[in-house]
Image (spheres, coloured by chain):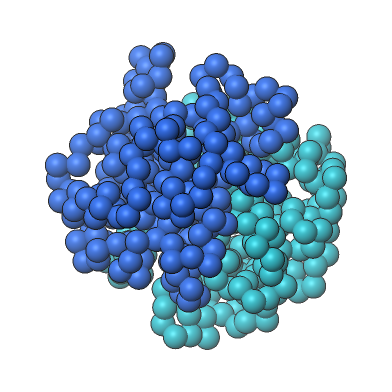
Chain colours: A blue, B cyan
Amino acid sequence: MYRLYDYKTSGNGYKVALLLTQLKQLFAYVETDILAGETHTPEFLAKNPNGKVPVLETPEGDLLSESNAILAWLAEGTPFLPSDRMGRYQVLQWMFWEQYSHEPYIATSRFWLHHPDAESFYAKLNERRPGGLKALKLMEDHLSRHDFLVAESYTIADIALYAYTHVAPEGCFPLDDYPAVRAWLERVRNQPNHITIQEKVQAS
Amino acid sequence: MYRLYDYKTSGNGYKVALLLTQLKQLFAYVETDILAGETHTPEFLAKNPNGKVPVLETPEGDLLSESNAILAWLAEGTPFLPSDRMGRYQVLQWMFWEQYSHEPYIATSRFWLHHPDAESFYAKLNERRPGGLKALKLMEDHLSRHDFLVAESYTIADIALYAYTHVAPEGCFPLDDYPAVRAWLERVRNQPNHITIQEKVQAS
């Protein structure tokens, strides 16, 4: 069985839990409290020298980190990753865009606002605002012309972007002005075997 | 022929130029001045709505963005991308790590220090320091045990990490304390058909 080391509110961990569930793969959920330093113990650093969740331990004992790389590994040979070269490229393009141009703005703002020392991050929140708004506008433009991000079907690109977009309002990025994004979120939620971010802890 | 839209000092563009050269693919280099706003014209945004270089136009007219996704697309079916599932995962893991945990610290510091308004970024440079040092230490630990990042052979993971690591000193991250990183840089430089970051403009 898989073991998923993750922090309860992490969208990056949610990506992996959601795909595992939709692939009907059982996994044990190992709660790892990043605020209590549990990703910086010698035991955890032996699993991921970068000291970050999620980490997926495979039934064979391999240790995988970087959420979007884990998605690509799990999805290979399944309908969640296109089989043609351009489709696979487009999935990767969206996932790299997510990690560089979306997550550091939208996910980081949400993390700071829910941090026990949230007030110490207030000054930095403003800096992250333009990047987050730019990311949402780019998604709105694309999704007003497409049902899903790639190949008009549900792929790991949608899972990678859904994870932090659907909780963007928790980072003070309300979605009222992004109707195409909201319609896409609903299409993602309607996929077979969808679980919510709260349900990831119980999914195992 | 390929067309590579790129800014002359960009390490992200260098990754693509280096791989194209090592794959013996001809390309036209289209210099795009990001400081003069040339990535935010309607013409450029039609090529990449995210308004960033590099963009690779294929001989078939497809437009590819996100440097590491372009590397994966170009390398498919070549010795630069492992053919086994775990090897491909490990390449992606390093490339996602590069974009999230290396580039925003080491490349961004270099960009700011060479910006015409460098002084306005001085306060932010300190913030990026711990992340850059952490990234270099992680590479040093790995490369003290391995000749290359993945599968003991030269892959696009090495190209992705070489691009900004070899110019880290230009961002005030000297490499004196990282002998394994320096030895790896030398191994990368010794690969067949290597070009320097300056040579990318003439490689076409």
The answer to which of A61 and B180 lies nearer the viewer is A61
The answer to which of B75 and A198 lies nearer the viewer is A198
- Residue A199: image quadrant is top left
Query: On the rendered structure, is A146 left or right of A73?
Result: left
Residue found at x 55% / y 71%: B73
Q: Is residue B99 above or below residue A199?
A: below
The answer to which of A13 and B101 lies nearer the viewer is A13
Q: Position of residue A29 (x, y in %)?
A: 52, 33
Residue found at x 43% / y 57%: A156
Query: On the rendered structure, is A202 left or right of A35?
Result: left
Query: On the rendered structure, is B97 left or right of B45?
Result: right
Rendered-image quadrant of the C terminus of chain B: bottom right
Residue found at x 35% / y 70%: A151
Q: Is residue A141 above or below residue A194?
A: below
Query: On the rendered structure, is B37 left or right of B139?
Result: left
The answer to which of B47 and A84 lies nearer the viewer is A84
Residue found at x 44% / y 32%: A201
Q: Position of residue A32 (x, y in %)?
A: 55, 26
- Examine the rendering and report whether any part of residue A26 can be seen: yes
Q: Is residue B95 above or below residue B6?
A: above
Q: Position of residue B72 (x, y in %)?
A: 58, 66
- Examine the rendering and report whether any part of residue B53 can be seen: no
